[in-house]
Image: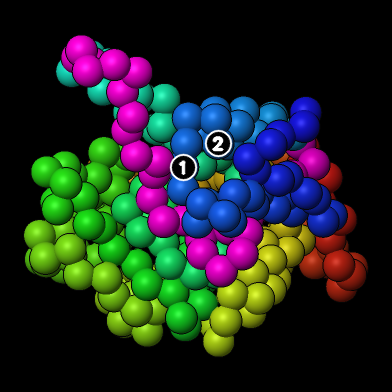
Protein backbone atom coordinates (compact mmCIF):
# COMPACT_ATOMS: atom_id res chain seq x y z
CA UNK A 1 0.00 0.00 0.00
CA UNK A 2 1.25 3.48 -0.89
CA UNK A 3 1.26 6.15 1.81
CA UNK A 4 1.48 9.92 1.48
CA UNK A 5 2.50 11.06 4.94
CA UNK A 6 4.78 8.25 6.06
CA UNK A 7 7.31 6.16 4.20
CA UNK A 8 7.82 2.45 4.71
CA UNK A 9 11.01 0.75 3.60
CA UNK A 10 12.68 -2.56 4.36
CA UNK A 11 16.22 -3.75 4.89
CA UNK A 12 16.36 -7.48 5.36
CA UNK A 13 14.13 -8.32 8.32
CA UNK A 14 13.92 -4.69 9.50
CA UNK A 15 11.09 -2.28 8.64
CA UNK A 16 11.79 1.47 8.67
CA UNK A 17 8.87 3.84 9.24
CA UNK A 18 9.58 7.50 8.44
CA UNK A 19 7.25 10.32 9.45
CA UNK A 20 7.40 12.19 6.16
CA UNK A 21 6.10 15.73 6.39
CA UNK A 22 9.25 17.76 7.19
CA UNK A 23 7.72 21.07 6.09
CA UNK A 24 5.34 20.73 9.05
CA UNK A 25 7.97 19.27 11.38
CA UNK A 26 6.35 15.83 11.04
CA UNK A 27 3.44 16.82 13.25
CA UNK A 28 0.81 14.12 13.61
CA UNK A 29 -2.33 14.66 11.57
CA UNK A 30 -5.44 12.53 11.18
CA UNK A 31 -4.07 11.33 7.84
CA UNK A 32 -0.59 10.46 9.08
CA UNK A 33 -2.05 8.77 12.18
CA UNK A 34 -4.31 6.64 10.01
CA UNK A 35 -1.42 5.67 7.75
CA UNK A 36 0.83 4.85 10.71
CA UNK A 37 -1.83 2.56 12.18
CA UNK A 38 -2.31 0.84 8.83
CA UNK A 39 1.44 0.38 8.38
CA UNK A 40 1.80 -1.09 11.87
CA UNK A 41 -1.07 -3.48 11.20
CA UNK A 42 0.65 -4.71 8.05
CA UNK A 43 4.00 -5.10 9.80
CA UNK A 44 2.42 -6.93 12.75
CA UNK A 45 1.25 -9.72 10.44
CA UNK A 46 4.36 -9.80 8.24
CA UNK A 47 6.39 -12.83 9.32
CA UNK A 48 9.46 -11.48 7.52
CA UNK A 49 9.75 -8.44 9.81
CA UNK A 50 11.65 -9.04 13.04
CA UNK A 51 12.36 -5.46 14.18
CA UNK A 52 11.00 -1.97 13.46
CA UNK A 53 12.61 1.47 13.42
CA UNK A 54 10.66 4.74 13.33
CA UNK A 55 12.22 8.13 12.59
CA UNK A 56 11.35 11.54 11.16
CA UNK A 57 12.24 13.09 7.82
CA UNK A 58 14.40 16.21 7.96
CA UNK A 59 15.80 17.61 11.19
CA UNK A 60 12.84 16.95 13.52
CA UNK A 61 11.44 13.66 14.77
CA UNK A 62 8.00 15.14 15.43
CA UNK A 63 6.91 18.46 16.90
CA UNK A 64 3.53 17.23 18.13
CA UNK A 65 0.13 17.23 16.52
CA UNK A 66 -1.75 19.48 14.15
CA UNK A 67 -3.75 22.37 15.59
CA UNK A 68 -7.47 21.86 15.99
CA UNK A 69 -9.46 23.77 13.38
CA UNK A 70 -13.15 23.15 14.01
CA UNK A 71 -15.37 23.07 10.93
CA UNK A 72 -17.63 25.65 12.52
CA UNK A 73 -18.01 27.80 15.61
CA UNK A 74 -20.60 25.35 16.90
CA UNK A 75 -18.09 22.55 17.47
CA UNK A 76 -18.97 20.47 20.54
CA UNK A 77 -16.87 18.57 23.05
CA UNK A 78 -17.85 15.41 21.16
CA UNK A 79 -16.35 16.94 18.01
CA UNK A 80 -13.10 17.62 19.84
CA UNK A 81 -12.97 14.11 21.27
CA UNK A 82 -13.60 12.65 17.82
CA UNK A 83 -10.72 14.71 16.46
CA UNK A 84 -8.44 13.52 19.26
CA UNK A 85 -9.41 9.91 18.60
CA UNK A 86 -8.44 10.33 14.95
CA UNK A 87 -4.92 11.34 16.05
CA UNK A 88 -4.30 8.58 18.59
CA UNK A 89 -1.77 6.19 17.06
CA UNK A 90 0.91 5.51 19.72
CA UNK A 91 -0.80 2.28 20.74
CA UNK A 92 -0.32 0.95 17.20
CA UNK A 93 3.43 1.16 17.76
CA UNK A 94 3.23 -0.14 21.33
CA UNK A 95 1.21 -3.19 20.30
CA UNK A 96 3.70 -4.38 17.67
CA UNK A 97 4.91 -7.86 18.64
CA UNK A 98 8.28 -7.11 17.02
CA UNK A 99 10.82 -5.06 19.01
CA UNK A 100 10.67 -1.40 17.99
CA UNK A 101 13.24 1.40 18.16
CA UNK A 102 12.70 5.15 17.85
CA UNK A 103 15.53 6.92 16.03
CA UNK A 104 14.98 10.41 17.47
CA UNK A 105 16.80 12.40 14.83
CA UNK A 106 15.64 15.76 16.22
CA UNK A 107 13.13 17.31 18.59
CA UNK A 108 10.45 14.93 19.92
CA UNK A 109 7.84 17.09 21.61
CA UNK A 110 4.30 16.41 22.84
CA UNK A 111 2.69 13.85 20.53
CA UNK A 112 6.08 13.25 18.92
CA UNK A 113 7.49 12.14 22.26
CA UNK A 114 4.43 9.97 22.84
CA UNK A 115 5.29 8.06 19.66
CA UNK A 116 8.89 7.61 20.80
CA UNK A 117 7.74 6.42 24.22
CA UNK A 118 5.56 3.79 22.55
CA UNK A 119 8.69 2.10 21.20
CA UNK A 120 10.77 -0.41 23.14
CA UNK A 121 14.10 1.40 22.72
CA UNK A 122 15.11 4.97 21.87
CA UNK A 123 18.25 6.38 20.27
CA UNK A 124 18.51 10.19 20.20
CA UNK A 125 20.63 12.74 18.38
CA UNK A 126 22.57 14.92 20.82
CA UNK A 127 20.82 17.99 19.36
CA UNK A 128 17.33 16.61 20.07
CA UNK A 129 15.08 18.09 22.74
CA UNK A 130 12.39 16.02 24.42
CA UNK A 131 9.41 17.00 26.54
CA UNK A 132 5.76 17.85 26.93
CA UNK A 133 4.23 21.35 26.67
CA UNK A 134 0.55 20.30 26.81
CA UNK A 135 -0.07 22.12 30.08
CA UNK A 136 0.32 25.50 28.38
CA UNK A 137 -2.75 24.68 26.29
CA UNK A 138 -4.78 23.44 29.24
CA UNK A 139 -4.23 19.83 28.21
CA UNK A 140 -2.29 16.76 29.29
CA UNK A 141 -0.61 14.03 27.24
CA UNK A 142 -3.45 11.96 25.85
CA UNK A 143 -1.87 9.23 23.72
CA UNK A 144 -0.20 7.31 26.55
CA UNK A 145 2.57 9.81 27.27
CA UNK A 146 2.08 10.24 31.01
CA UNK A 147 1.65 6.51 31.58
CA UNK A 148 4.63 5.36 29.52
CA UNK A 149 6.91 8.12 30.76
CA UNK A 150 6.34 7.31 34.45
CA UNK A 151 7.20 3.68 33.78
CA UNK A 152 10.52 4.75 32.31
CA UNK A 153 11.74 7.54 34.56
CA UNK A 154 9.64 7.30 37.73
CA UNK A 155 6.95 9.43 39.32
CA UNK A 156 9.01 12.40 40.53
CA UNK A 157 10.83 12.97 37.24
CA UNK A 158 7.63 12.50 35.24
CA UNK A 159 5.73 15.07 37.31
CA UNK A 160 8.61 17.52 37.01
CA UNK A 161 8.73 17.24 33.22
CA UNK A 162 4.96 17.42 32.78
CA UNK A 163 4.30 20.24 35.24
CA UNK A 164 7.24 22.49 34.32
CA UNK A 165 6.96 21.73 30.56
CA UNK A 166 10.74 21.76 30.45
CA UNK A 167 12.39 20.36 27.34
CA UNK A 168 15.45 18.30 28.17
CA UNK A 169 18.40 17.56 25.92
CA UNK A 170 19.44 14.10 24.83
CA UNK A 171 22.23 13.76 27.38
CA UNK A 172 19.83 14.43 30.26
CA UNK A 173 17.32 12.07 28.68
CA UNK A 174 20.02 9.39 28.70
CA UNK A 175 20.91 10.11 32.33
CA UNK A 176 17.31 9.67 33.52
CA UNK A 177 16.66 6.56 31.41
CA UNK A 178 14.37 8.14 28.84
CA UNK A 179 16.63 7.10 25.94
CA UNK A 180 19.04 4.19 25.60
CA UNK A 181 21.77 5.80 23.50
CA UNK A 182 22.85 9.23 22.28
CA UNK A 183 24.59 9.84 18.97
CA UNK A 184 26.18 13.02 17.61
CA UNK A 185 23.47 13.85 15.05
CA UNK A 186 20.31 12.64 13.38
CA UNK A 187 22.10 10.50 10.83
CA UNK A 188 24.06 8.85 13.61
CA UNK A 189 20.89 8.19 15.59
CA UNK A 190 19.25 6.49 12.61
CA UNK A 191 22.38 4.48 11.83
CA UNK A 192 22.66 3.35 15.45
CA UNK A 193 18.96 2.46 15.71
CA UNK A 194 19.12 0.51 12.45
CA UNK A 195 22.20 -1.34 13.66
CA UNK A 196 20.39 -2.29 16.89
CA UNK A 197 17.37 -3.44 14.89
CA UNK A 198 19.57 -5.56 12.61
CA UNK A 199 21.23 -7.12 15.64
CA UNK A 200 17.81 -7.96 17.10
CA UNK A 201 16.63 -9.32 13.75
CA UNK A 202 19.49 -11.84 13.74
CA UNK A 203 18.10 -13.46 16.87
CA UNK A 204 15.23 -15.94 17.04
CA UNK A 205 12.11 -13.86 16.26
CA UNK A 206 9.68 -15.87 18.38
CA UNK A 207 12.02 -15.65 21.36
CA UNK A 208 12.31 -11.89 20.84
CA UNK A 209 8.53 -11.54 20.88
CA UNK A 210 8.22 -13.68 23.99
CA UNK A 211 10.89 -11.55 25.65
CA UNK A 212 8.74 -8.46 25.09
CA UNK A 213 5.70 -10.29 26.42
CA UNK A 214 7.55 -11.45 29.53
CA UNK A 215 8.81 -7.96 30.35
CA UNK A 216 5.67 -5.95 29.61
CA UNK A 217 3.20 -8.36 31.17
CA UNK A 218 5.45 -9.35 34.03
CA UNK A 219 6.04 -5.80 35.30
CA UNK A 220 2.41 -5.58 36.44
CA UNK A 221 2.45 -8.99 38.14
CA UNK A 222 3.79 -10.19 41.43
CA UNK A 223 7.24 -11.75 41.26
CA UNK A 224 5.80 -15.25 41.55
CA UNK A 225 3.29 -14.59 38.78
CA UNK A 226 6.03 -13.16 36.60
CA UNK A 227 8.24 -16.18 37.19
CA UNK A 228 5.39 -18.48 36.14
CA UNK A 229 4.82 -16.42 32.99
CA UNK A 230 8.52 -16.61 32.16
CA UNK A 231 8.55 -20.36 32.70
CA UNK A 232 5.43 -20.85 30.54
CA UNK A 233 6.89 -18.83 27.67
CA UNK A 234 10.19 -20.68 27.96
CA UNK A 235 8.32 -23.98 27.79
CA UNK A 236 6.46 -22.88 24.66
CA UNK A 237 9.76 -21.99 22.99
CA UNK A 238 10.96 -25.57 23.39
CA UNK A 239 8.37 -26.63 20.81
CA UNK A 240 9.62 -24.27 18.06
CA UNK A 241 11.91 -25.06 15.15
CA UNK A 242 14.01 -22.04 16.11
CA UNK A 243 14.78 -23.53 19.52
CA UNK A 244 15.86 -26.76 17.85
CA UNK A 245 17.98 -24.73 15.46
CA UNK A 246 19.59 -22.88 18.35
CA UNK A 247 20.56 -26.11 20.11
CA UNK A 248 21.90 -27.74 16.93
CA UNK A 249 23.95 -24.67 15.97
CA UNK A 250 25.46 -24.54 19.46
CA UNK A 251 26.46 -28.19 19.34
CA UNK A 252 27.90 -27.90 15.83
CA UNK A 253 29.52 -24.51 16.54
CA UNK A 254 27.87 -22.71 13.65
CA UNK A 255 25.66 -19.66 13.30
CA UNK A 256 21.95 -20.49 13.75
CA UNK A 257 19.52 -20.08 10.87
CA UNK A 258 16.29 -18.95 12.48
CA UNK A 259 13.10 -19.22 10.45
CA UNK A 260 10.47 -17.89 12.86
CA UNK A 261 8.66 -21.15 13.42
Location of residue 198 with respect to 260 vertically, above or below: below
Residue 147 can be seen in this image: no
At 46% from the left and 42% from the top, the residue drawn is 28
The percent coordinates of residue 158 (x first, y second) are 17, 61
Which residue sits furthest front? 73
At 57% from the left and 55% from the top, the residue drawn is 23
Residue for badge 2: 32
Relative horizontal placement of residue 160, taking residue 94 as reference (left or right): left
For the residues labelled 2 and 1, say whether their Cβ atoms are less than 8 Å apart. yes
Q: CA distance from mark 2 to mark 1?
A: 6 Å
User: Magenta stretch?
Assistant: 47-76
Location of residue 140 with respect to 247 vertically, above or below: above
At 55% from the left and 87% from the top, the residue drawn is 184
Q: Secondary structure at mark 1?
A: loop
Relative horizontal placement of residue 207, taking residue 69 as reference (left or right): right
User: Of the numbered discs in the image, which one, if any, rests on residue 223?
Assistant: none
The percent coordinates of residue 244 (x first, y second) are 78, 49
| Closest to the observer, 208 or 44 | 44
Residue for badge 1: 28
Identify the image quadrant of the C terminus: top right
Let me know if residue 33 is in the magenta part.
no
In the figure, residue 163 lies in which quadrant?
bottom left
At 29% from the left and 16% from the top, the residue drawn is 72
Location of residue 260 with respect to 126 vertically, above or below: above
- Magenta stretch, main secondary structure, is loop
Relative horizontal placement of residue 12, taking residue 192 as reference (left or right): right
Q: Residues within 10 Å of mark 2 (few under 14, many from 20)?
A: many
The percent coordinates of residue 82 (x first, y second) are 32, 18
| Closest to the observer, 211 or 147 | 147
Amino acid sequence: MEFRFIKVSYKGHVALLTLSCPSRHNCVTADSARELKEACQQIEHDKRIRAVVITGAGKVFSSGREAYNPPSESATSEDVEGWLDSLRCASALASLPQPSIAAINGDAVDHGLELALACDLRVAARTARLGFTDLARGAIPWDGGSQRLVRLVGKARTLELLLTQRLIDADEALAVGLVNKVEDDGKGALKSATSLASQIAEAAPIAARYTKEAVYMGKDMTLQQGLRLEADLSFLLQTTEDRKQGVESFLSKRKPRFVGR
